[in-house]
Amino acid sequence: MRAVRLTAWGQEPALVEVERPVPREAEVLIRVEAAGLCHSDVHVVDAAAGALPYRAPFTLGHEVAGHVAVLGPGADGTTIGERVVVHGPWGCGSCAQCAAGRDNYCDRRGDLSWHGVGLGRDGGMADYVLVPSARHLVPIGDLSADQAAPLSDAGLTSYHAVAGLRYSLGEGSTAVVIGVGGLGHLAVQILRATTASRVLAVDIRDESLALADRSGADFATLLQADTARVLRKRSGGVGVDAVFDFVGSTATLEMATAALRPSGELALVGSGGGQINVRKPGFLPPGFRLSLPFWGTRPELAEVIALARSGALRVETERFPLSAAPRAFDRLRQGQVRGRAVLVPD
């Protein structure tokens, strides 16, 4: 079978032929219908040797949808032919967090040599992917695979971030999404579908503001020197209740904290390397709370799929055949991908 693999650190991923895996014990073999591509994949490819605990070579791709092709002799919880999406953050499988479907917060994550499918373990940018257990699978029914695959990270991460702050987003509240890209445009939709909050969006590109509008934002603006003031004015002058920062640069973090009201919440999702100083007394709003959400849980992924199947959530995608994976990586690096890139076996 074909697979897009990181063969060695410091090298570009290569489309190569590898042996199709055979499921053993509780393992499940999935015939891939679509695999998402995101900036995390670029970060992995660009990482220096030793920067990540992963051991090369391995197949990339942590956003995976397809159908069950072969069951291991001890596999249960699914059937041949069932269409599924893979819950990507694989933990140790034995701690209390993993038992609850919260592999994203596995208690032994720091001891593992992987973070999940396509992240140290063979992933879904291939014709087939081997999943350790059916507990990592969520049925998708008739939802298209090119929608389901990116929902397993871009949708799930956004949903998890919003779910953590939903208690503060009731009637009359205001939420801000910074960075309306592959994750941010889904966060706008999730906020509209699951909260009563007004949704404001911020980006540095006019095309991203247009995407925010299409996704249902109540207001969208470019990131400028006075953006915090503009957002505060839009929230009645008191400041916004929550900011979801999908960029994470120093500029966006400073703007976010300046826009928040007292007791405001900041969910830092992006990995832009920015920093803010936390000290008391200081310049942060009184009662300020910071969260660092990572991916999401399996039960939440089922909720994301249900939202998509209801029509409340739709990913803006750009499709590429699996054989064009190098071109997809190039376009993503250059910031030319609209929404989310998805690889489809050809």
Image (cartoon, helix red, strand yellow):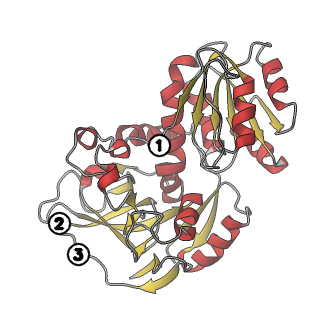
In three-dimensional space, the C-alpha distance between marks 1 and 2, rounded to whole angstroms, equals: 30 Å
How crowded is the residue under tag 1: few (<14 C-alpha within 10 Å), some, or many (20+)?
some
Q: What's the residue at 69%, 45% (across, down)? A: 249
- Residue on which disc 1 sits: 294
Q: What's the residue at 74%, 45% (across, down)? A: 211
Q: Nearer the viewer, residue 287 or 268?
A: 287
Q: What's the residue at 57%, 42% (across, down)? A: 269
Image coordinates for residue 93, horizontal then vertical, percent: 23, 50
Image coordinates for residue 112, horizontal then vertical, percent: 31, 57
- Residue on which disc 3 sits: 22
In three-dimensional space, the C-alpha distance between marks 3 and 1, rounded to whole angstroms, equals: 31 Å
Mark 1 or mark 2: which is in front? 1
Q: Nearer the viewer, residue 16 or 237?
A: 237
Image coordinates for residue 330, horizontal then vertical, percent: 67, 72
How crowded is the residue under tag 2: few (<14 C-alpha within 10 Å), some, or many (20+)?
some
Count of numbered circles in the view: 3
- Residue on which disc 2 sits: 72
Discs 2, 3 touching: Cβ within 8 Å: no
